[in-house]
Image (tube, helix red, strand yellow):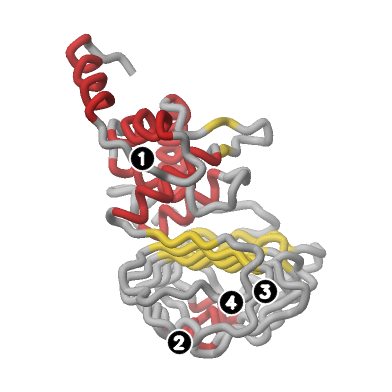
Amino acid sequence: MHKNKRSWDCALEELRGAVTISIPEVPIELYKPLRLSYDYLKSNEAKYLFLLCSLFEEDSDICPEELLIYGMGLHIYPGINNLEHARNKVCYMLETLKDCFLLSQRSYKNYVKMHDVVRDVAIYITSKGKPIFMVSHDMNSKEFPRKDSYEQYTHMSIVANNFDKFPSPIIFPKLKLLMLRLYFTESFKLQDDFFDGMSKLDVLCLRGHSYSHSILPFPASIQRFSSLRTLRLSNLRLDDISIIGELVTLEILNITYSELEELPVEIGKLINLIMLELRNADRTLKKDFSWGLTKTSSIGGTTYDGGK
């Protein structure tokens, strides 16, 4: 990106005059240039995508396809409803973020990575402005992250290896995205009313540690979502997911590396689907699409754009 001398002089003055912020694990001299790089991103979409990367676990490889389906669910690509166009947009924005040294390229496929220091700065930004994120990745914690209030949070990412008790329900009136990854050693249960306080949720990602562990049973409150557009289930044993057929607003259903014996006929009710991606753990999924999916059908990881 070419800038004239006045632009560079302006950036230098802003860098010199930037307020010094103390963030644990972030050297003071690094915060200013990183914040300036973020502030100088020309598109709000690129800023949003950058902040979404902070929701992933530290030192993890970030798959662009995940950013695609979360972004589609959150409607952060204005004027784009076609999946292929959205992929191109994500690719372009990731290149922009890499050019600004806010992300780095991984050797595996086209994955990207966010440096730990950059991630800490991104989490700080999301804790002070809008949207407001909560990131809780404390593997030693034995309880759901406790706050005096959850009303301000719009995005949450929780990683844990055990919860003595799941709270229910908690009110999240503004929550749009929830990423929940559980490294439990046994099958676990979310209370039926677990999602009752998340009526505004657009994106839900539930991940286990191994598909030998399952959600027993699938929470009944999931059917109360009135605007959920993206649902991702990964590394889980899914005994009965027929209730998903009640999510009539769903546009993207992604079930990967999970154990699922049969895709229920209720999925045929999801008339707004534009992407259905299935990657079964044991590859023995019974497939019968005779009941519908008029816009899209995808199996074994192949994705078809429904042309919405």
Q: Nearer the viewer, mark 3 or mark 2?
A: 3
Q: Nearer the viewer, residue 288 or 130?
A: 130
**Residue 247 horizontal side relative to residue 199, left or right:** right
Check the picture and name the quadrant holding the C terminus: bottom left
Mark 3 → mark 2, Cα distance in angstroms: 18 Å
Q: Residue at x 34, y 48 (%)?
A: 77
The image quarter containing residue 206 is: bottom right
Residue tagged by mark 3?
A: 162
At mark 1, the secondary structure is: helix
Q: Nearer the viewer, mark 4 or mark 1?
A: 4
Q: Nearer the viewer, residue 198 or 26?
A: 26
At label 4, the amino acid type is Glu
At mark 4, the secondary structure is: loop
Check the picture and name the quadrant holding the N terminus: top left
Q: Earlier along the polypeptide chain: callout 4 or callout 2?
A: 4
Mark 4 → mark 1, Cα distance in angstroms: 34 Å
**Residue 74 horizontal side relative to residue 39, left or right:** right
Callout count:
4
At mark 3, the secondary structure is: loop
Mark 4 → mark 2, Cα distance in angstroms: 14 Å
Mark sitting on residue 46: 1
Residue 205: image location, x then y, percent? 54, 65
Mark 4: few/some/many CA within 10 Å (<14, 14-19, 20+): some
Q: Earlier along the polypeptide chain: callout 3 or callout 1?
A: 1
At label 3, the amino acid type is Asn
Mark 4 → mark 3, Cα distance in angstroms: 7 Å
Mark 3: few/some/many CA within 10 Å (<14, 14-19, 20+): some
Residue 204: image location, x then y, percent? 49, 68
Residue tagged by mark 4?
A: 143
Q: Residue at x 26, y 24 (%)?
A: 16
Residue tagged by mark 2?
A: 169
